[in-house]
Image (cartoon, helix red, strand yellow):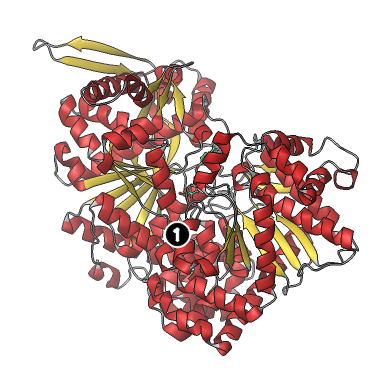
Amino acid sequence: TENYFTQPGVANIGLSKEDIKTSFLEKLFYSLGRIPVVATKNDFYTSLALTVRDRVFRKYVKSLEQYVEEDARGVAYLSAEYLPGPHLGNNLLNLEIMEETREALAELNLNLDEILNEEVEPGLGNGGLGRLASCYMDSLATLGIPSIAYGIRYEFGIFKQEIQDGWQIESTDKWLHNRNPWEVIRPEISFEVKFGGHTEHSRDQDNKLHIEWIPGTEIKGTAFDTPILGYQSNAIILRLWKAEATESFDFAAYNLGDYYRAVEKKMRSENITKVLYPNDENLSGKELRLKQQYFFVCCSLKDIIRLHLLQGRKLETLHEKFTIQLNDTHPSIAVAELMRLLVDVHQMGWEDAWKVTQNTFAYTNHTLLPEALEKWPVNLLRNLLPRHLEIIYEINSRFITEIREKDFSGEQISRMFLIDDRGEPTVRMAHLATVGSYKVNGVSALHSGLLQEQVLKDFAQLWPKKFTNVTNGITHRRFLAVSNPRLAALISENIGKDWLTQLDKLKGLEPFAANKDFRSKWMQVKLENKKNLATHIKELTGIEIKPEMLLDIQVKRIHEYKRQHLKVLHILSLYLQIKKDKQNTVPPTAFVFAGKAAPGYFMAKRIIKLITSVGDLINNDPEVNGTLKVIFLPNFSVKLAQHVYPGADLSEQISMAGKEASGTGNMKFALNGALTVGTLDGANVEIREEVGEENFFLFGLTTEEVADKKKQGYHPYKIYSENENLKRVIDFLISDELTKGDPELFRSVYDNLLNQDPYLLLEDYQSYVDQMENVYKVWQDPEKWAQMSILNVANMGKFSSDRSIKDYCEKIWKVGAVKV
Ligand code: 26M
């Protein structure tokens, strides 16, 4: 490789300022056919992206050579969602050419920040789960773990959110409109995927059973590769599949002379990868969603088998060379598909194939919410994947035979069935994933515990060693080094740069918490970041805030369990207090929200309207005199997030205990020096452990207390009637002042809280309000606040995704790094 790249005449991929400038101009002229005077910002962005992509590909080629040479064991990560965020800035950091590039562009009178801002990010995920997959890719690449990530190339990612008249309005995300300079199509890597039809069973002369699936339709998946670069090191590939019609189908239709029918078929085939489904919506019965899942699983497994055989290996050793991680149950049909490929296509015996399968997959669970556990109707599977349904029944019946010999009650056994036949028969995908995997993990200590005590309790009793925990992590390179360059610089000036690859080194900041001069620099950085965020707020909403205000922020998907409306109740309590007392003892605060609501989730969309209505009222009330602001930032994304975390003072992590599997926003805030007000839920528990309870604002019931409360019978109305302040706040929800003459506007929220309140807002209300009083007390003491902020950052080492990936390697994958 070295020789190839250094041959005269081969593209210049040097990293000096001059090299970058030359390549940049070459891309502009020869790839885009532009000269600077007529070039648009997007042309400049594209030229720079192509310049950087060449250099990233070079790293990838070298990594790949090494993996092949060492015949290394590798990881295939299967995820229906990815949220990589903008690539350009991250790649510049990882190539360590940020400053060289800035200067090269400056010499051409161009501004790097403006060009960075041109990038449209791939929104190929809903939230936490997709972003986690991308953080893990960053760490896999940085650590040199042989790996490949597979997913779906959605033409339209997560919908774009606008706020009109206070309501969320959705529109399609056309992220490919300006073309995507980071991806490379691989027309030669494509596979056929079949759907529908029926199966035929026959016996040969040796009485061996042969099963043939005669499909009804078939389509083709083509690979699109995006290189993901690690810090100072390797690159790995994100391989996304796009659906197309197969030639054979077009051909059959042409023969009939029906050109339009052929084109129609083509369009129908391409539907499969058109659009990402928003979660938090009832997906059961959504045929297209199941097609998407099977489509990408089928292509990915065929590709893995191709790579395995390419190296001259036998399929019997697949599990020795590959481990396949299932990111939630979305790819769990892979268990049946691998069995089909091994048994039907490659003629392996069932027992051998099952051994390979069970030793290949590992499954990560990301939620305990019952409504979020995937169940596919048996009838839908029979129509779409008849052979897979047979395989699932076979797995089920062998599994039941196995557990009947053990010490399980009839009730337990039927609870463990892969098929749920109370009501419409469905397949429990979490059970399929659990039975078909050698390891199952949750995403925080609390969540993994609950997973073993609740949702998969019987399985944990059967296979205690199969279950483990890997606490989530985030890439501190994107979420500190790239997005918060001021804080990163201050940290590096004082403790060096080792934290970029070893986040534990932040511990070296601890002694600085006692240093007044350092504290002042620290808060100066925070203030600059808040000014930057204030500019974005003004641009996006027109609302002006003073950067000295306490920036109290909650950004995440809108969901009742995350309790954005608990924050609203708190804000209203402050507001009503000011109105009553005719004076304001609350420190000047901007309450910032952002997040998308699933388009079909009625309550979540109401909560957005509630936030914006409270904002309209408070932001324009002269009696509040500008000291309280309520802001809803539209269209939350990775790009926007990178401006939000650095500017935050207070991080809101207020889900009902036991509901948030981990959370990762909580980590991003704390890493950027925000203090957390939160419940003992998900990874909050571990964050508090790490930063110290004295540096964390805790409130609310514990998971156990929640369970007890529900068992005893929970009566929100009683709490309401006994708490005068709370009663005032709740009644205000249906007041004319807030609803401006439409008393029905928030009636659903009001009724829900008083009658059911499934997420115990009323129960936790007083404890929250009290803890917020404490927050304000500490805020009045800036030295104390600064000290707590520094101590938070100093103790965030555990939450690097590098640590998470090392945990996966040791506890689950048994895969090691390859040195490049
Ligand atoms: C579906 C239907 C109805 C209501 C809710 C859902 C639903 C909820 C959550 C579907 C999927 C859900 O989980 C996916 C997800 O993104 N989970 C998040 O994964 C992150 C990474 O592990 C965690 O940090 C978050 O706590 C977890 O919510």
Q: Amino acid at mark 1?
A: Glu
Question: Looking at the picture, does residue 152 appear above or below residue 412?
Answer: below
**Label 1 sits on residue:** 686
Q: Residue furthest bottom?
A: 517
Q: Position of residue 274 (x, y in %)?
A: 53, 37
Q: Secondary structure at mark 1?
A: helix
Rate crowding at label 1 as few (under 14), some (14 to 19) or many (20 or more) other CA atoms within 10 Å: some
Residue at (65% x, 55% y) in the render: 767
Q: Quadrant of the N terminus?
A: bottom left
> Is the CB of the residue bearing disc 1 within 8 angstroms of ligand 1?
no
* Along the viewing direction, whichever of 583 and 51 lies nearer the viewer: 583
Q: Quarter of the image containing the C terminus?
A: bottom left
Front position in the image: 248 or 387: 387
- Label count reads 1
Choose top left, top right, bottom left or bottom right for residue 750: top right
Percent x, y for residue 80?
44, 41
Residue 485, image x, y percentages: 54, 75
Answer above or below: position of 561 versus 13. Answer: above
| 316 vs 95, nearest the viewer | 316
Above or below: residue 98 compared with residue 131: below
Q: Residue sitting at 49 percent across and 63 percent down?
A: 688
Residue 431 lies in quadrant: top left
In the image as oriented, which residue stretches furthest toward the left? 206
> Residue 418 location in percent, x, y?
36, 25
Q: With 187 as the anchor, is 653 left or right in this view?
A: right
Relative depth, front residue between 402 and 679:
679
Is residue 127 in view from this perspective? yes
Whether residue 192 appears in this view of the structure is no
In this rendering, the answer to whether 373 lies above or below 238 is above
